[in-house]
Image (spheres, helix red, strand yellow):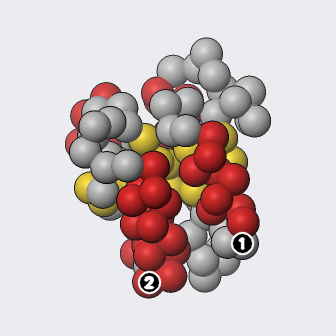
Amino acid sequence: MSNRISYHLDEHIKSVTARELRNRGIDVTTTVEVNLRTKSDDSQLAFASREGRVLVTHDNDFLKLAVKNTNHSGIAYCHPTKRSVGQIIEILVLMYEVCTPEDMIGRVEFL
């Protein structure tokens, strides 16, 4: 396992977020890129966990999944109207800089 966080952005996260994280050297996948767009939330979380990626989402259904399944690589949740795209990017960069993948296992981080 790498000592750096990687992210998986669900379909509700704006594509500029992936671009800006990648511009900073951060490994990111998106739901569209990995052909999960029509798949269930369970499938999304399973993919992120298999890949060792923190799932970034605005979808509070993932909070319910996190209660039932603590065996995931981490969830970064932000209410869709609480933060700007720029703020979300800044917080994800900070998480990347200070957290390890091991820190995020089973954890939900509220952005």
Q: Position of residue 90 (x, y in %)?
A: 45, 67
Q: What percent of the width, then of the height, locates residue 37?
A: 63, 22
Dot 2 alpha-carbon crowd within 10 angstroms: few under 14, some 14 to 19, many 20 or more? few
Measuring from the top left, give residue 83's x and y in whole percent.
Answer: 31, 49
Q: Residue at x 60, y 77 (%)?
A: 4
Q: Which quadrant holds the C terminus?
A: bottom left
Three-letter amino acid code of the residue under disc 2: Val
- Specify the quadrant that holds the N terminus: bottom right
Q: Earlier in the sequence, mark 2 or mark 1?
A: 1
Q: Which residue lies under the disc numbered 2?
A: 98
Q: Which element carries disc 2, helix, strand or loop?
A: helix
The front one of 62 and 90 is: 90
Instruction: Using the image as rendered, state which of residue 30 and residue 91 is in the foreground.
Output: 91
Please state the horizontal and vertical placement of residue 34, each as a whole percent of the image. Answer: 74, 35
Identified at 59% across, 20% down, the residue is 39
Residue 64 lies in what quarter of the image? top left
Q: What residue lies at 67% left-to-right and 72% top-to-bottom? A: 24
Decide if residue 68 is in sight here: no
Horizontal side of residue 89 vs 76, given as left or right: right
Q: Residues within 10 Å of mark 1 (few under 14, many from 20)?
A: few
Q: Measure the C-alpha gap from mark 2 to mark 1.
A: 15 Å
- Is residue 32 or residue 70 the one in the foreground? 32
Q: Which residue is mark 1?
A: 25
Q: Which residue is farthest top?
A: 38
Q: Is disc 1 placed on a helix, strand or loop?
A: loop
